[in-house]
Amino acid sequence: EAGVAQSPRYKIIEKRQSVAFWCNPISGHATLYWYQQILGQGPKLLIQFQNNGVVDDSQLPKDRFSAERLKGVDSTLKIQPAKLEDSAVYLCASSPPRPLIDEQYFGPGTRLTVT
Amino acid sequence: AQTVTQSQPEMSVQEAETVTLSCTYDTSENNYYLFWYKQPPSRQMILVIRQEAYKQQNATENRFSVNFQKAAKSFSLKISDSQLGDTAMYFCAFSNTGANSKLTFGKGITLSVRP
């Protein structure tokens, strides 16, 4: 079974530029999550999708971050414009439909550096 | 809101020895799940072990076991017979139950296994 795929793995941009990350969850997984992991900290949930609907985006800085999950499969996370404090690893995770336990499967992450 | 606290930023252990990683959490809920995730350097996060709060028996997975103290809201991870491949960041995480459950992570602890 293929795991969660993310691209790119690394990205360096200047502040005020835009960037987009892509995630392909495990086939059949209904729930998709985007996390931000700042160096030395645990992941923080940015947004959670159930199929193509948003379940929780309470911690997403909506003035600059946006995310979509068209057709309930792949997802993209965009930052526009980027700030220095957005430097972090962006993790995508997915979980199967109606999980008995919230077992999430993580992708390798995208390391973003904003200069 | 739930919080997860990992007060030890880093630990070191000799290969083949046993080490215990601490975690405390705060919640008003009676039923929930607790997890330990491992994040090796530059590699993706994987689940090590999980515990359902309604189970009194501590979870074990090969060399990994937990000490779950519900009243004290404590959830420590014991790694027996430490191996070099155990070198990683370890995150304690909490999840509520239900369809829209989400993970709350601690700050993590860096574990180094010395040869």
Image: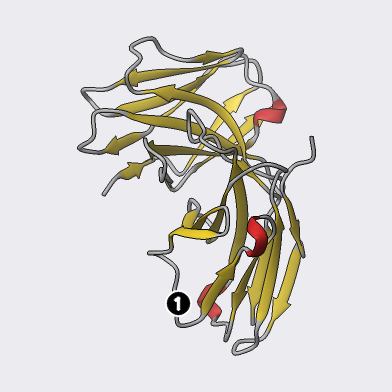
- Residue B59 vs B94, above or below: the answer is above
Label 1 neighbour load within 10 Å: few <14, some 14-19, many 20+: few
Residue A46 makes an appearance in the image: no
Residues B30 and B25: in front is B30
Q: Position of residue B31 (x, y in %)?
A: 29, 28
Task: Answer left or right for B93 relative to A68.
Answer: left
- Residue B31 vs A83, above or below: the answer is above
What is the quadrant of the C terminus of chain B in the image? top right
- Residue B87 vs A79, above or below: the answer is above
Q: Position of residue B30 (x, y in %)?
A: 24, 28
The colouring scheme, among rainbow, by chain, secondary structure or one colour, is secondary structure
> For residue A113, which quarter of the picture?
bottom right
> For residue A56, which quarter of the picture?
bottom left
Residue at image coords 66%, 69%: A112
Q: Chain of mark 1?
A: A
Please give the count of numbered marks on the rendered protein.
1
Q: Position of residue B54 (x, y in %)?
A: 32, 19
Residue lying farthest to the front in this orientation: A71
Residue A43 makes an appearance in the image: yes
- Residue B8 vs A51, above or below: the answer is above
Residue lying farthest to the top in this orientation: B57
Q: Secondary structure at mark 1?
A: loop
Residue lying farthest to the bottom in this orientation: A16
Mark 1: which amino acid?
A: Lys
Where is mark 1, residue-wise? A62
Residue at image coords 38%, 9%: B57
Residues B67 and B82: in front is B67
> For residue A34, which quarter of the picture?
bottom right
